Image (cartoon, rainbow, N blue to C red):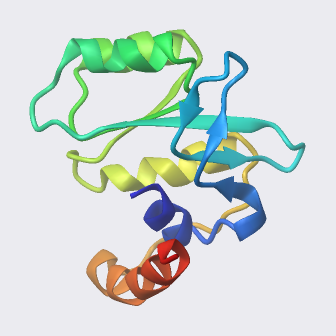
Amino acid sequence: LMLTLAKLFQVPRDFYSGKGLTGESREVDFHFINRAGDRFFCEVKLMGKGNPESADSTIARRSNIFIAHTLSERNKSQLTNRGHHWVALGEDAGYARMGTVFSYLDIPCAPFHGDLDSALDTILPFVFEEISP
């Protein structure tokens, strides 16, 4: 998912990584890197219904970017107030917020304005190629 979002917004390969460790040596599955070299760790929770505990995991793990299917307004407010960035994929064009997050964090990217289905058809072969051993 994170690699697909990176490809959708044309984040250059040098500005993301599939594995890493936080300052507390917690393993994370994906992180982005901005132009200054700062790392932004990602947490993904794709449950269909809002789950208040899922947002808590982002705070506990010191993730910077939280990707969820559904987030309550309260979760969004809590995450924002604590300096975490969030994307709710279950909302109409929810993925588009990822471009805003990239821009805010100074992660090189390009805006996406095309047809999502067509773009995914083009992107997915590159995603599979990149993750293949």
Q: Nearer the viewer, residue 76 or 4?
A: 4
Q: Residue furthest front?
A: 133
- Report x, y in % for residue 27: 57, 32
Q: Residue placed at 45% from the left, 73% from the top?
A: 113
- Report x, y in % for residue 47: 16, 36
Q: Nearer the viewer, residue 100 or 107?
A: 107
Q: Residue placed at 57% from the left, 18% from the top?
A: 62
Image position of 121 with respect to 54: above or below: below
Q: Is residue 121 left or right of residue 58?
A: left
Q: Quadrant of residue 17?
A: bottom right
Q: Residue placed at 57% from the left, 67% from the top?
A: 111
- Report x, y in % for residue 83: 59, 17
Q: Is residue 26 left or right of residue 112?
A: right
Q: Residue furthest left?
A: 49
Q: Nearer the viewer, residue 94 or 130?
A: 130
Q: Residue placed at 52% from the left, 37% from the top?
A: 42
Quadrant of the snapshot with the N terminus:
bottom left
